[in-house]
Amino acid sequence: MSPMPTAMTMRKIVIAALGAALGAAAGLSFYQSRHLPEPVVPGPGVTAVKKLSDYFGPLEGTANDVNVYVLEGAEPGGAFLVLCGTHPEEPAGRLAGWIFAENASVSKGRLFVILTANRSASTVTRLGGAYPPDYTIVTPWGGRTFRMGDRWSSPLDQWPDPEVYVHYPSRQELAYIDIRNLNRTFPGRPGGTLTEKTGHAILELIRKERVDVVIDLHEAELQYPVISTIVAHEKGADLATLTSMMLSSEGGFAMGVENSPRALRGLSHREIGDNSDAVSLLLEAPQPFLDATRGRTDRALLLTGRDEFVVRAGKQGLLFEKIDDAGWPIDVRVGRHTSTILQILEIWSEDNPGRAVVAGGVPRYDEVIKSGTGAYLKDVKTADPAKIVYE
Amino acid sequence: MDATASAALVLAVMVAAYIAARVLKISTELSLLAAALAGALAGGAGLPARHIVEGAFTYFDIVLIFVSATLFMNLLKESGGAAFVVRAILRRFHRRKSPLFVLLAVLLLIPGALTGAGSVTVLIMGGMVATVLSYMDIPRPRVAAIIFLIAGLSAAAPPVSLWAMLTAAGVNMPYVGFFLPLLVPCVVLSLMTIFILGRKARPVDLEKALEELPQAPPKMTWLRVAAPFLAFFLLVIAGRAFPFSFPILGLPLMFMAAALAAFLLSPVKIAFLRTSRETVHQLLPLIGTLTCAGILVQIMALTGVRGLIAITTVTLPVTVVFLTLFLILPVSEAVLMWGAAPVLGVPLVLLFNTIGLDPVVALAGMSVIWPLGDAIPPTAIIGRLTTATVGVKEPYGQFLKHGLVPAALIAAAGTLMVVFSKKLSFLTVF
């Protein structure tokens, strides 16, 4: 054998070995983040933990057969659904939901909480986005680690994408990738993709449980015009306006109101309102981590919301929400969500006494900022193992 | 060190590593990888295995489309179908340049318009159109420039324009009203391109051309050539017409179905495995570039370099933004490919919206300019794909030189669409 092929073969072997080592190290990291257990210690108010497949059987056994936490009061009343993790890369929504699931008590009516509406999307991070695989919320007893997640369902669970996504039932054409975006696939489709089935299952829950109000929790980049606001279906315009007024005057932070555009299809605030009796609202909190101009992409940015480049964009008038060197810490974002949900519950219950939902035990904006989100996460080590549920 | 200085330092290290690798005669794709790895080290991320592998998969779907579409075209070539079509077009149109140019421009526009990918235009139509144009005495680099520019416009053309779709999604704007603002410039500029670059084309010397062209197999028929294309377009159309009952196949599988049809209908026996091997071998540099470009984008996001580029661009004075769109958009495309839409497209559209421009027309104008970047290094994916498909032997710079005038027209048209978007808003009817 001539020396050239041998050298070439050796080179190939070395490169293949390096590639395999890199692949193994990365593969381990992908596996660990996809299977990172996220414990939930159900609080005193949780009376049952159902599965989404209880409302739509074909979802059983899939990545999105997620937990539905039911908090039922002693007195009959209305029903609320708090939807978190529609976009898992927006963690304040999930964390606010966690606080409800682990702390809330309900005296009247029923409260349904879904912590990871698109669980598949919580098991993957964005290609090219350099997201961290997870993040840890510091607690008095240590810390709780959560999956970072993405905006779109994992291609491991739903692939391939079409060359263009045609929304059901409007037939509006959307970017191909949005067929894996739960907040573009409502009201869902029973025979559709995993993401469409998930949307359909959530609608089934809303219809079967006679849910009165759905609140979908999100975060948005500061360059996005719909931010620090409640996006309301026309059925919920008054409820959203009153909530906004109350929060802006007494809640400690400014909250706007936007009407749900009729031309923009697939979003929860539009489709849930159109396809069920429920009032649909969507809350947006500011998250600089999502901004296209963000600097270093890491856990610190995710949790502190501090970014020099985004501040520069703000100084140029390119943002729709203010930002300074203090950033937008996670506690502020979580607190906005908890306070807004509590305010909506109160106003709804006052206006609809027959369908009231009365909840307590959940911290408001100033309390979350003062004590930190971690103060409201229960210690898994001291909890009854039989009661722990995993997301 | 503040974020700007830190990101600028990492960017400088990346650029230096890329230049050093090129000086050492290392290939483009490995130079991109070297830049990414150097950037990760300079940014304090060490050797981030997760980010490297995740970034490598950023353009995985596009890689699959490249491979399956090229296999389809290579099988068609092996079957004698390409020669058959070229001979037939030449016989019919060899004396009539204008209708031939219009026909070729339309043929080039269709695949990219339907799929949103200029590469698909190059892979499906590029080879055949190149053969026809070459017989009109148009130099190969000029032929490649025609195909590349119209392929780019086809990608921007409706109904599927990924730059517009991804940017619109990023600003919560429905992908509605884009049809005419995209169609009109794409059609007009495609015709201008082929007529400008083909102005010196001579009528084909039919006898000489037919003599030089490979013979088509005697049993080759229009049906045998058209059936694989029909299979492909039927699958695309079925997906659109019956989106809720037809299974999602994805473009790679659609191209594989077309490839299978070409293989089964071939009048001559084709060595399928050999053709497959040659296809992958042919595409390896492009696949490598896409893979390494994905890694580079990921490391740029990780270290803040991506943000530095984005913030520097969008904080320029508006007049400067207008005047440099022809540069900013193609360069962002060259580095980020479709990733340029969320990184630069979103802040730019928001900026334009803030100053009272029509966001739909402005975005359509930007979408027309973006594909020009596909010829620019470091990635130059479609440019290189085109020169390879056309069989350009001259240096890559020759191809770029030939495309300069129509590219300048495209950039000017796109910029004017942005500047005068308010006045052009009547186009946003559907």
Image (cartoon, coloured by chain):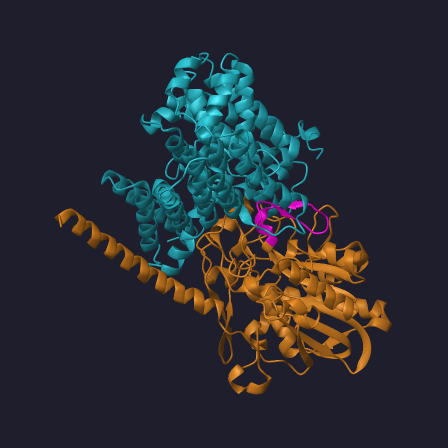
Position of A288 relative to B87 (above/below): below
Magenta-colored span: A162-179
Quadrant of residue A86 within the rendered picture: bottom right
Residue that extends furthest to the right in the rendered view of this protein: A354
- Above or below residue A96? Residue B253 is above
- Where in the figure is residue A375, as x and y percent of width and height? 56, 76
Q: Colour of chain A?
A: orange
Q: How many numbered marks appear?
A: 0
What is the quadrant of the C terminus of chain B in the image?
top right
| Quadrant hosting residue A239 | bottom right
Q: Quadrant of residue B137?
A: top left
Q: Is residue B20 visible?
A: yes
Q: Is residue A121 left or right of residue B356?
A: left
Q: Residue B290, position in %: x, y?
A: 40, 45
Work out which residue is located at the far left of the displayed protein and give it: A2
Q: Position of residue A148 (x, y in %)?
A: 51, 64
Question: On screen, B358 above or below A242?
Answer: above
Chain appearing in cyan on the rendered image? B
- Tell which of B142 and A93 is nearer to you: B142
Identified at 43% across, 31% down, the residue is B80
Residue A312 lies in the magenta-colored region: no
Residue A170 part of the magenta segment: yes
Q: Residue at x 35, y 43 (%)?
A: B274
Picture coordinates of residue B240 (x, y %)?
A: 64, 44
Residue at 55%, 60% in the rendered image: A89
Residue B357 at least partly seen: no
> Is residue A104 placed above or below A190 in the rendered structure?
below
Which residue is at a point 30% across and 44% down the rendered structure image?
B31
Q: From this viewpoint, which residue is outermost toward the front?
A: B219
Q: Is residue B59 left or right of residue B241?
A: left
